[in-house]
Image (cartoon, grey):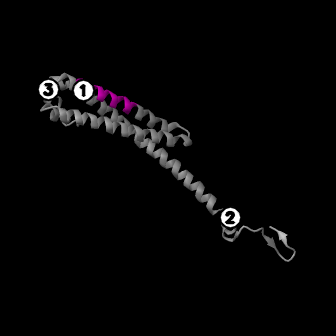
Amino acid sequence: MEKIYETKIIELLDKIKDRLLFFEQETIDILSCDVDEIEEHSDNRVKITHELDRVFDHIELLCSEMEEDGDRVRRIIRSSRDLTEVAPDEEAIYFKMQEIGSLINRIKDSDVQAVDRIDREKDGLLGKIKAENTGAGAKAAKFMVGTNDGRQKYVGTGGKLV
């Protein structure tokens, strides 16, 4: 494999690893942050995912530019090759992908916990909304909205203001 491609791919894999570490931190922050901060951390995770897609697309482009080595490198990146099948000059890519794979597995564990937290918070908020909407104040407000034509309300023959 040409050294220039190997160097560039390893740089991109390092970038992926760094972004995954940031993604992992955002996931961990969801577990312990204030409920008002969950959306920001979730948005950051989406942005990171888009960045990762662009980096993987760049790696795919580099593999396409490589001649016969491109397919071998693709299989390494997709983790579909065993170390015994990897050429010595491709081992650095193989080991970098092993690091990334370990990091992804770690993220999957914390991601399940983050989704559980989001679901709990959502259920709690929905419960509060339901409780507010079934109380006496909510029923009176519904009546008021249905009968309010913008004029002041008077009751009885004495014209008492409501």
Local secondary structure at mark 2: helix
Residue for badge 2: 141
Residue 133: quadrant of the picture: bottom right
How far, Cα to Cα, is label 2 from label 1?
64 Å
Farthest-out residue, bottom: 157
Picture coordinates of residue 47, whole percent (x, y): 41, 39
- Most foreground residue, 41 or 128: 41
Q: Is residue 136 above or below residue 37?
A: below
Q: Which callout, 2 or 1, points to the residue nearer the camera?
A: 2
Residue for badge 1: 95
Farthest-out residue, left: 68
Residue 66: quadrant of the picture: top left
Magenta highlight: main SS:
helix
Residue 13: within the magenta?
Answer: yes
Q: Is residue 156 above or below residue 162?
A: below
Q: Is residue 149 left or right of residue 116?
A: right
Label 3 Cα crowd, 10 Å radius (few <14 / some 14-19 / many 20+): some
Give the residue at x 45% y 38%.
44
Give the residue at x 68% y 69%.
143
- Most foreground residue, 145 or 36: 145
How far, Cα to Cα, is label 2 from label 3?
73 Å
Picture coordinates of residue 151, whole percent (x, y): 75, 68
| Residue 87: mark | 3
Q: Is residue 77 visible?
A: no
Which amino acid type corresponds to the residue marked 1 in the rendered image?
Phe
